[in-house]
Image (spheres, helix red, strand yellow):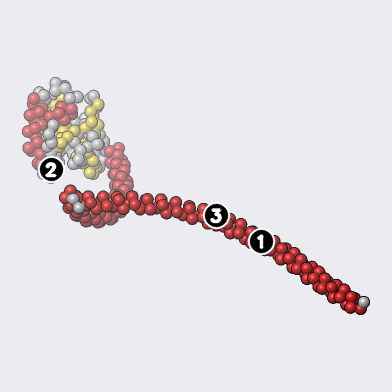
Amino acid sequence: MSRLRETQDSLELFLDTICNMFGGFIFIMLFVVVSLRTTTERVYEDVVTEERASVVELQELEIKLEELQRQWESVSERVEHARSVVEQLGSKEASQFQHETLDVLDELNESSEENASKSRRIAELERERLELDVEYKTATTELREAQKKLDAAHEDAESARKLATRKSSPPQMRSGYGFRTEIGVILKYGRLYFWHNYDGRVKTFNAADFHVVEEDSLSARTEPLPWRGIDLTSPGVSNRLDAAFSRFDPSLYTVAIVVASDSYEEYSIVRDFLKDRTFRIRPIIGEKGGLVADRGGSDAQTQ
């Protein structure tokens, strides 16, 4: 009986051991399965991530490939164009064109040098122009000031002349030859001067062509102005004399001509003109340094 108990205890120990090992094996299998599942999920996620990254990289590589393909095509076209140009440059026409181009470049170089020289000359002329412009403005200012002074001097002289004219008695030529009135003219400086202004039968001193040199209570000495009167030395003198004597009737006036020593040649011009117009004339020779006097009806005397 005792042996059977020992056998049963051994079997129980054996079964217990087997059960414990099977339980441990089951536990290990469960642990392995759980671990594999976790690892598989991680690996799967890594694989998916890597696949996604590979797809993006692949797309980028395809884009780069297309860009490189376009560049290659462009470079190929350029190479073909360059090859055709090189082939053309090797021809006679290209060689001739090259020589002509070089000749044109030489001409352009010469023209450029010539233009540069002209530009320098223009710059020099521009500087000279500026300098002359400054000088011109300065001279213009000085001339303007001088003109103002001259105008002031003319005004003073005109005022003095008018004052002297007002003080002097207006001369009158004497009447002669019956009903004829005598016109007094003077030839001097190659010019003809009317001694009086005529308004019908009224005569006044011609202060526009004469200036009073000196005067006293009985007389006034006058001189003709060299820039006034009728110029007898220039062309068209007959027309000017016609205009001057057209207001006088030859049947009513006689012309007394005082001829200065510097105008003897011009006397013949006036004399022939007056004879053609049937004027009576009375020539008076004016000696150098001498005086010619005329006393009018008012006893006023002008020399």
Callout 2 amino acid:
Gly
Observer-side mark, 2 or 1, equals 1
Examine the image and state in which quarter residue 163 appears: top left
Q: Earlier in the sequence, mark 2 or mark 3?
A: 3
Callout 1 amino acid:
Thr
Q: Looking at the figure, which quarter contains the C terminus?
A: top left
Q: Looking at the figure, which quarter contains the N terminus?
A: bottom right
Secondary structure under badge 2? loop
Observer-side mark, 2 or 3, equals 3
Q: Give the percent coordinates (x, y) of residue 31.
A: 74, 66
Looking at the image, which residue sits at the far front? Answer: 1
Which residue is labeled 2 in the image?
290
In the image, is residue 296 above or below residue 148? above
Please report the residue visible at 13 percent of the width from the left and 26 percent of the height from the top: 254
For residue 35, side relative to residue 141 (left or right): right
Secondary structure under badge 1? helix
- Estimate the spatial distance between the alpha carbons at disc 3 and disc 1, rounded to whole Å: 22 Å
Which residue is labeled 3 in the image?
55
Q: Give the percent coordinates (x, y) of residue 136.
A: 28, 51
160 or 294: nearer the eye? 160
Which residue is labeled 1 in the image?
40
Secondary structure under badge 3? helix
Q: Earlier in the sequence, mark 3 or mark 1?
A: 1
Report if residue 187 is visible in the image.
no
* Label 1 crowd (10 A; few <14 / some 14-19 / many >=20): few
In the image, is residue 241 above or below residue 43? above
Callout 3 amino acid:
Val
Examine the image and state in which quarter residue 261 appears: top left
Looking at the image, which residue sits at the far right? Answer: 1
Q: Earlier in the sequence, mark 2 or mark 1?
A: 1
